[in-house]
Image: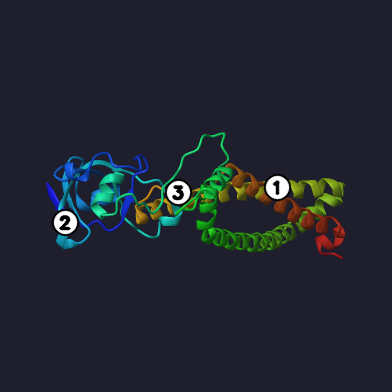
């Protein structure tokens, strides 16, 4: 199977050496081994072992390449909206195709786990000539500024939602307790103490808050799964867009129980302090 493919965005292989494996003249007639990203392979309809033609412009596709591998790229939030398709070549093959030997745009250096990336970058920059070294954490920090702005925006929405839900919950509890006025009056007339009535109403508020927390967690899990399903299909990626961690669930449940407890205490306290005759409607 022979395809004519225009190479627009070449991506350097991270496992090749920065030198020639052999003179380019000896490799000119050999098909170049290349690796295609899964999305690109699916769009071209090619498989491992197929042959494609490479070149820098449509009129000069003069190099043959054989597909040696089809890979799934690592999820990258900073590149998800670019929708680029990648083709990987060995460094000598890419340099020969571009006509620029001994030159690269960027490359990565792996360190032992015990080494400090910042210290290694400073040492490299002291002897640098024609390049600049950066720790990967610094690059990731610079490329994630947009996501930090979105995160702050989400934090603001969360605070507003919590405040609004707390007010709504308090109103619901007040209305719920108001419906129990006659019940509270009867309990007071039969000698049940204010403390017992207060505890009973508080327990009811906690049960309602617990049920609401369980329904909220289930709703959040469903919404998270639907979000991931939609955007993973839309962007053709395995990147996870929505995550519900145990810490988030724990915080949400504790917050819900705390707000329910506070709202129930306010409503129950207001009820038990009212004269039972007034509660009965005779005062």
Is label 2 in a helix, a strand or a loop?
loop
Q: Earlier in the sequence, mark 2 or mark 1?
A: 2
- Residue at 51% in and 53% down: 139
Q: Which mark is residue 240?
A: 3
Which residue is label 1 attached to? 206
| Residue 94 against residue 275 in the figure, above or below | above
Distance CA(mark 2)–CA(mark 1): 71 Å
Distance CA(mark 1)–CA(mark 3): 34 Å
Distance CA(mark 2)–CA(mark 3): 38 Å
Q: Is residue 94 visible?
A: yes
Q: Earlier in the sequence, mark 2 or mark 3?
A: 2
Q: Where is residue 127 shown, x and y percent of the image?
A: 51, 48
Which residue is label 2 attached to? 61
| Residue 234 against residue 33 in the figure, above or below | below
In the picture, the quarter occupied by the C terminus is bottom right
Q: Is residue 276 left or right of residue 256?
A: right
Is label 3 in a helix, a strand or a loop?
loop
Q: Is residue 214 left or right of residue 90?
A: right
């Amino acid at each position: 199977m022979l395809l004519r493919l225009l190479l627009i965005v070449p991506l350097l292989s991270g496992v090749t050496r920065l030198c020639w494996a052999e003179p380019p003249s000896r490799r000119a007639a050999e098909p170049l081994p290349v690796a295609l990203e899964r999305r690109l392979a699916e769009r071209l309809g090619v498989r491992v072992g197929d042959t494609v033609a490479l070149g820098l412009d449509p009129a000069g596709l003069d190099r043959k390449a054989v597909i040696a591998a089809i890979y799934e790229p690592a999820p990258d939030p900073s590149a998800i909206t670019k929708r680029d398709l990648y083709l990987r070549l060995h460094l000598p093959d890419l340099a020969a195709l571009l006509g620029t030997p001994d030159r690269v745009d960027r490359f990565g250096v792996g360190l032992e786990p015990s080494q400090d990336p910042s210290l290694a970058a400073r040492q490299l920059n002291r002897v640098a000539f024609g390049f600049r070294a950066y720790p990967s954490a610094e690059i990731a920090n610079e490329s994630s500024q947009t996501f930090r702005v979105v995160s702050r925006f989400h934090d603001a929405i969360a605070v507003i939602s919590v405040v609004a839900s707390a007010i709504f919950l308090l109103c619901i509890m007040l209305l719920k307790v108001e419906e129990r006025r006659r019940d509270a009056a009867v309990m007071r007339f039969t000698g049940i103490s204010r403390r017992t009535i207060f505890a009973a109403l508080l327990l009811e508020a906690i049960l309602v808050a617990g049920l609401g927390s369980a329904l909220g967690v289930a709703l959040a899990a469903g919404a998270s799964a639907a979000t991931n399903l939609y955007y993973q299909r839309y962007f053709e990626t395995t990147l996870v867009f929505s995550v519900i961690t145990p810490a988030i669930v724990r915080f949400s449940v504790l917050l819900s129980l705390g707000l329910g407890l506070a709202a129930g205490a306010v409503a129950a306290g207001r009820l038990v302090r009212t004269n039972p005759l007034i509660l009965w409607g005779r005062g």
